[in-house]
Image: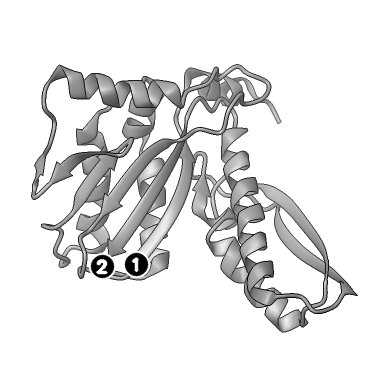
Amino acid sequence: MIEPNMATMLSYIMTDATIEKEKLQAMLSKTTDQSYNSISIDGDESTSDTVALIASNQVTGTDESEMEEALMEICQGLAADLVRNGEGTGHVMRVEISNFPGTDLEARRLGRHIVNSPLFKCAVSGNDPNTGRLAGAIGSFMGKFKNDEFVGGMSLSLGGRTIFSNGKFVLEGDSVERELSDHMKNAEYDEHSDYPPHQKFVEIGVDFGEGNGNGGATVFGSDLTAEYVSINADYRS
């Protein structure tokens, strides 16, 4: 039950820095959009969401840009850990959206649409580089919400390898499929584990092409495993 806004979580961040309340709030809002509001386990929201940033004003001369950079690093790390420790999670996906023909908010929505696709989540769980399911999730979103936008310059990548470009898939035989599957296996961990043994990701890139738009986002999501189904099927309130 983790989905923005802001996922099922209570996050309290403390600093001794001296920064005006309005500036601190602006930093937190920006950071939250790019961290806690950019994750999803299963698409279900909760009523129990809080993030608070508290400053004691004990240290003067704070460099505000350094403070914002540190805050972003902390919040994005914590947000990724929320996904990594999700119920039954066996892989964490990191989806990078760039040159999106729209706003950053719309780019985040596309990223969440990808990581919430049941078919694609299952493919990731099985280490299956099912590029059609990825393309289908993107096409579903663009067809519903951005039907008039040009997508001919879009390219897709998985594990750093281009898998779609110039309107067609770029898949060159069994060796490429093994490479993509191995990338997913390398990011896998036991869905029954008490604690994730590493911080690797299934890396997914969606680039709409230079000059096509200025929207961008990084979204973290999990796969869909039998353990997740078991936990939530057996749960009783």
Q: Is residue 112 left or right of residue 236?
A: left
Residue 209 against residue 82 in the figure, above or below:
below
Q: Is residue 30 left or right of residue 130?
A: right
Q: Could you say which quadrant of the image residue 32 lies in?
A: bottom right
| Quarter in which the C terminus is drawn | top right
Instruction: Give the amino acid type for the residue marked by disc 1 in the picture.
Output: Gly
State the mark number for residue 234.
none
Residue with the mark numbered 2: 101
- The structure residue drawn at horizontal position 57% and vertical position 39%, both measured from the top left corner, is 83
Pick whichever, 43 or 20, lies toward us: 20
Badge 1: residue crowd in 10 Å (few <14, some 14–19, many ≥20): some
Q: Is residue 216 left or right of residue 174?
A: right
Instruction: Give the amino acid type for the residue marked by disc 2 in the picture.
Output: Pro
Q: In what element is the residue under mark 2?
A: loop
Q: Position of residue 187 (x, y in %)?
A: 46, 27
Residue 96 against residue 209 in the figure, above or below:
above
Residue with the mark numbered 1: 215
